[in-house]
Image (cartoon, rainbow, N blue to C red):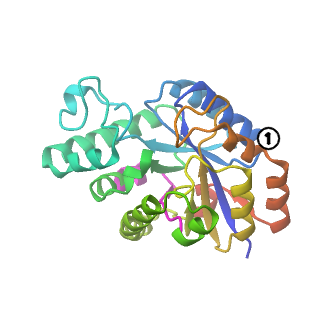
Amino acid sequence: MPTSLIVNADDFGRSPEINAAVLAAHRQGILTSASLMVTGDAAEEAAAIARATPTLAVGLHLVLVAGLAASAPADLPHLVDAAGRFADDPLAAGLRLARPAARRELAREIAAQLARFAATGLPLSHVDGHLHLHAHPAVLDSLLPLAVRHGARGLRLPRDPLLPALAWDRGRPVRKAGWALAFGLLARRAAARASAAGLAVPERTYGLMQTGQVDEAYLLHLLARLDTATAEVYLHPTTGARLEPLGPNPEELAALLSPRVRELVARRGIRLTTYAGMAGQ
């Protein structure tokens, strides 16, 4: 059977340039869904775009690292600084969750971000996390029941195979091996819990190993070799300039808009879908 593929843009709502890229990639390219940062600088604009574009599935991009909280700083003394910002380093953010008080604050913050998403009036397609911190056991255990209660249909887990990634790009091998080990263990635990909760989880999710570098050449390479029934690829498109090494990246928008990519999708019979579509299979 041909692969059912979710094509997702992360960081929706982070900036007007990212919002513009999401809309263009959905209307003119292969993008099927986006993950909304409800505390992003352009979150209100992103929600308005999504409400006007009902064919675009939108999920929550849970921010617990390198971003702002939805709750007041006084309500999260063990998680954020005085400005309400989480730690920029994922390891530091994860270590803060070792304290029981921090985990209680975590549950409140997850609920606050889901409530802010609900206030947009958009149906909740799925849940994922900025820098994948949602795969942390403490986060996942608080997140899953709340996500189901809010109507989520799916959960992203970073399941990007190491060896094919290194065959394509041998850069950063130690970092990639560390990602594969850490996220492989986390994803194995999370997948069983997500499945028990009735959430769709693709067999493969691509983007981790090539984060910030999902250009046309890589996307063509990936699509030509898809061999699972379900998969997701996530990108960080923008109409602006690249501001950070890991994205957002205007080349990723170009990849989503590429006629060659669209032709390959059609030729291989790849079914572009969303988490709701995948959950209904």
The residue closer to the viewer here, 238 or 139, is 238
The residue closer to the viewer here, 136 or 47, is 136
Percent across and percent down for residue 96 are 21, 45
Secondary structure at numbered mark 1: helix
Percent across and percent down for residue 2 are 74, 72
Q: Is residue 159 above or below residue 20?
A: below
Instruction: Provide the residue designation for mark 1.
Output: 28
The single residue placed furthest to the left in the displayed view is 100
At 43% from the left edge and 58% from the top edge, which residue is drawn? 175
Q: Is residue 55 above or below residue 274?
A: above
Which quarter of the figure has residue 86? Answer: top left
Q: Is residue 95 visible?
A: yes
Which quarter of the figure has residue 64? Answer: top left
Q: Judge from the rendering whether residue 117 lies leftward or rightward of residue 229; answer left or right.
A: left
Q: How many C-alpha atoms fall within 10 Å of the one at disc 1: few (<14), some, or many (≥20)?
A: some
Percent across and percent down for residue 157 are 47, 60
Query: In the image, which residues are magenta?
Result: 144-161
Report the amino acid beneath label 1: Gln
The residue closer to the viewer here, 148 or 273, is 273
At 57% from the left edge and 55% from the top edge, which residue is drawn? 210
Task: Look at the image and tell me in which quarter the N terminus lies.
Answer: bottom right
